Image (cartoon, rainbow, N blue to C red):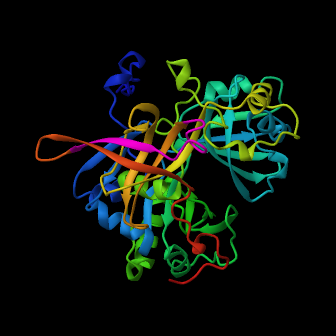
């Protein structure tokens, strides 16, 4: 008998393909009582499992897991990997030690941000970039002249974010000794003939870790964490709860708080590190990097925008609201907002035109349209510039962590 040949999918019909399922899908789908799903990077991910308030509360009071598999991951290896990454990103990669992580951004030649992400140094000439969007063509073009290899490894890695004050206690109960692991450091553990990498990183602004393993060990890892965390109130969380936590922590998200330079249709929508208050990470002394000349000119001239935290009166969340000076002149817009159960404040992240972020910030108002029984009510609420993050507990960086 002639063997049947599997038919390859027609690339012209890619739009008919369903979203991919992560290695943790058998567990997340079973726990998703609301059947609330959203797309992320070509994958189907959970927006909310059961109750948003309880999920957010667990981040701040217990332990939570969040499926990180859709996060885009690139492997950069080779003799000139450090030199290449120094040219690509704004931070000095030479200062990043093996077994460490740092947060960074990369820009185009005009000094506008392409994306942000975390850079892991796994070995002397071996790095991993984790980010929100796919950039392989950009990374490959930027590698011209460097002795490096770059490949996307998103589907080769199963990743979970374990966050909350009890996250260390859960890992300890699961048999992983991370007592001495400092923030932005990496530890590896043998697990069932394979390896589990744990980094003390996260996106909640709280004590937490990110766990990295192979897809075939994903379900065993999930089960092991939930067995160990049963007494610590561990629960899965969706993107809605994580968004509240990251807003409290003052963290930004690509395509929510800024538009990647190569995706923007309108030229005035792109942002520089100065516009996003990320210029603190630029290493001006390390040599040339993408966008350096443009950023030097901007440093001398000044920037048009400032990315700030806002404290707004009342308790009506101000997502996508417009900011006015003296209730008349539009001076900015809000990119993320929530009523924070943690700090009991109505908070927001926003782009504000200079100098309304500082010397002219005394008369700012936010225009909010609140739905009241099928009818919108226009609210003009007083706002003030405040420091980020809104929430920064000492337990986030305490080493050894507390056993809550």
Q: Position of residue 354 (x, y in %)?
A: 59, 35
Q: Can the viewer see residue 219 in this picture? A: no
Which residue occupies the foreground of this view, 255 or 400? 255
Residue depicted at 43% across the width and 31% down the height: 330
Residue at the location (45% across, 43% down)?
Answer: 364
Q: Bounds of the magenta span?
A: 353-370
Locate residue 63, reporting x and y percent: 44, 71
Q: Quadrant of the N terminus?
A: top left
Residue nearer the viewer, 137 or 111: 111
Nearest the viewer among 190 and 386 is 386
Q: At 72% across and 23% down in the image, what residue appears?
A: 109
Q: Position of residue 70 (x, y in %)?
A: 47, 44
Residue reaching furthest to the left: 373
The total number of labels drawn is 0
Vertical side of 299 occupied by 70: above or below = below
Residue 46 in view, yes or no? yes
Residue 304 vs 195, above or below: the answer is above
> Is 363 in the magenta?
yes
Give the image location of residue 243, x and y in percent: 42, 52
The answer to which image quadrant residue 73 occupies is top right
Q: Is residue 177 magenta?
A: no
Task: Specify the quadrant of the image occupied by residue 19.
Answer: top left
Q: Is residue 87 left or right of residue 227?
A: right
Q: Is residue 363 above or below residue 338?
A: above
**Which residue reaches farthest top?**
12
């Amino acid at each position: 008998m002639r063997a049947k040949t599997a038919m390859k999918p027609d690339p012209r019909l890619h739009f008919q393909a369903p979203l991919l399922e992560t290695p943790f899908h058998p567990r997340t789908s079973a726990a998703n009582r609301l059947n609330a799903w959203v797309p992320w990077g070509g994958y189907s991910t959970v927006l909310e499992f059961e109750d948003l308030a309880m999920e957010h509360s667990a981040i701040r009071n217990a332990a939570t897991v969040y499926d990180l598999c859709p996060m885009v991951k690139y492997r950069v290896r080779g003799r000139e990997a450090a030199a290449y990454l120094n040219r690509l990103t704004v931070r000095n990669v030479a200062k990043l030690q093996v077994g460490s992580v740092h947060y960074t951004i990369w820009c185009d030649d005009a000094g506008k941000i392409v994306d942000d992400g975390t850079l892991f140094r796994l070995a002397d000439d071996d790095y991993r970039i984790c980010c929100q969007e796919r950039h392989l063509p950009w990374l490959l073009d930027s590698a011209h002249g460097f002795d490096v290899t770059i490949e996307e490894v998103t589907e080769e890695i199963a990743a979970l974010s374990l966050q909350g004050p009890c996250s260390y206690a859960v890992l300890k109960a699961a048999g992983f000794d991370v007592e001495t692991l400092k923030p932005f450091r990496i530890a590896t553990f043998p697990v069932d003939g394979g390896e589990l990498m744990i980094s003390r990183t996260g996106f909640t602004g709280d004590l937490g870790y990110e766990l990295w393993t192979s897809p075939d060990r994903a379900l065993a890892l999930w089960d092991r964490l939930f067995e160990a965390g049963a007494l610590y109130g561990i629960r899965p969380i969706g993107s809605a709860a994580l968004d509240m936590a990251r807003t409290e922590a003052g963290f930004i998200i690509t395509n929510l708080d800024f538009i990647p330079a190569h995706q923007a249709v309108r030229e005035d929508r792109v942002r520089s590190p100065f516009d996003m208050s990320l210029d603190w990470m630029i290493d001006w002394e390390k040599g040339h990097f993408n966008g350096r000349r443009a950023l030097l000119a901007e440093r001398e001239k000044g920037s048009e925008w400032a990315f700030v935290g806002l404290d707004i009166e009342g308790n009506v969340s101000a997502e996508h609201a417009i900011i006015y000076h003296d209730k008349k002149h539009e001076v900015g817009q809000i990119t993320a907002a929530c009523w924070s159960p943690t700090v009991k404040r109505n908070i927001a992240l926003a782009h504000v035109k200079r100098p309304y972020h500082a010397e002219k910030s005394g008369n700012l108002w936010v225009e909010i349209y609140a739905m009241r029984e099928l009818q919108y009510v226009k609210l003009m609420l007083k706002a003030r510039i405040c420091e980020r993050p809104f929430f920064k507990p000492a337990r986030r960086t305490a080493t050894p962590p507390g056993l809550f």
